Image (cartoon, rainbow, N blue to C red):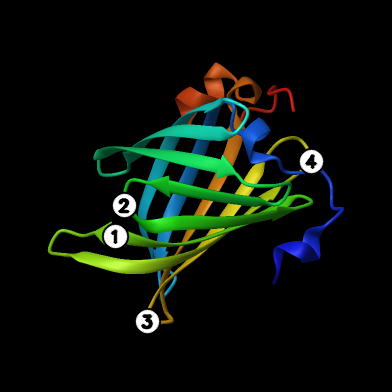
Amino acid sequence: MKPEDFAGREPELLIEEYFAGHTKAWGMFQDRSGDVRRQFEVDIEGTWDGKTLTLVEDFVYDDGETERKTWTITKLDDHSYEGVADGVIGTAQGKAYGNALNWTYQFALQTESRTWHVTFDDWLFLQPGGVLINRADVTKFGFKVGEVTLIFVKGDQVSSTAVETGRVASSATF
């Protein structure tokens, strides 16, 4: 798959618009066998200054651990982005066309016993109604070690009941 394959698809994904303000996400990490190893919830605050998107992500994992990551993303042209974040080795590269964005980057993944340098091939797809689906393959030396799946919803599209129960309510305005 190439980002250009999605040119012209709607709704158009402009991450600087989508992530400005509050966004909520729910996700999970599956190992290479498909077993769910970790689930999490994320609150994201985004600011866009006309050139740089800053995302402050507050994670709460199913085991109670919390973590904060900050992305600084620069829009280079109509289709290209680059970003840096906590744990990213070097610079993440992004290409966006139509409703899709592809991020690729290396990441220093902390485990209990050591740090693994892994590669993320991260795809985001904006759906009608404002839901953003994110799927990432995680590899090491070209071998798949896992997969991350996330669902993002804009903060104003999730009712307080949905946030409290961890699900999107049918009364949410999409």
Q: What residue sits right under mark 4 in the picture?
A: 128
Q: What residue sits right under mark 1 in the picture?
A: 108
Badge 3 amino acid: Phe
The secondary structure type at the circle numbered 1 is strand
In this view, 39 is above or below 35: above
Q: What residue sits right under mark 3 in the picture?
A: 141
Residue 12: x percent and y percent?
79, 43
The secondary structure type at the circle numbered 2 is loop
Mark whose residue sits in front, 1 or 4 = 1
In this view, 132 is above or below 9: above
View extreme (top): residue? 160
Mark whose residue sits in front, 4 or 3 = 3
Q: What residue sits right under mark 2 in the picture?
A: 87
Number of residues whose C-alpha sits closer than 10 Å to that of mark 2, classed few (under 14), some (14–19) or many (20 or more): some
Residue 34: x percent and y percent?
44, 70
Q: What's the distance in space between the residues labelled 4 and 3, CA to CA? A: 36 Å
Q: What's the distance in space between the residues labelled 2 and 4, CA to CA? A: 32 Å
Residue 8: x percent and y percent?
87, 53
View extreme (left): residue? 113
- Whether tag 2 and tag 1 are in contact, CB under 8 A, the answer is yes
- Whether tag 4 and tag 3 are in contact, CB under 8 A, the answer is no
Residue 45: x percent and y percent?
48, 26
133 left or right, relative to 59: right
- Whether tag 2 and tag 4 are in contact, CB under 8 A, the answer is no
Badge 2 amino acid: Gly
- Whether tag 3 and tag 1 are in contact, CB under 8 A, the answer is no
* Circle nearer the N terminus (3, 2): 2
Quadrant of the frame with the N terminus:
bottom right
In this view, 113 is above or below 55: below
Q: What's the distance in space between the residues labelled 2 and 1, CA to CA? A: 5 Å
Relative depth, front residue between 110 and 92: 92
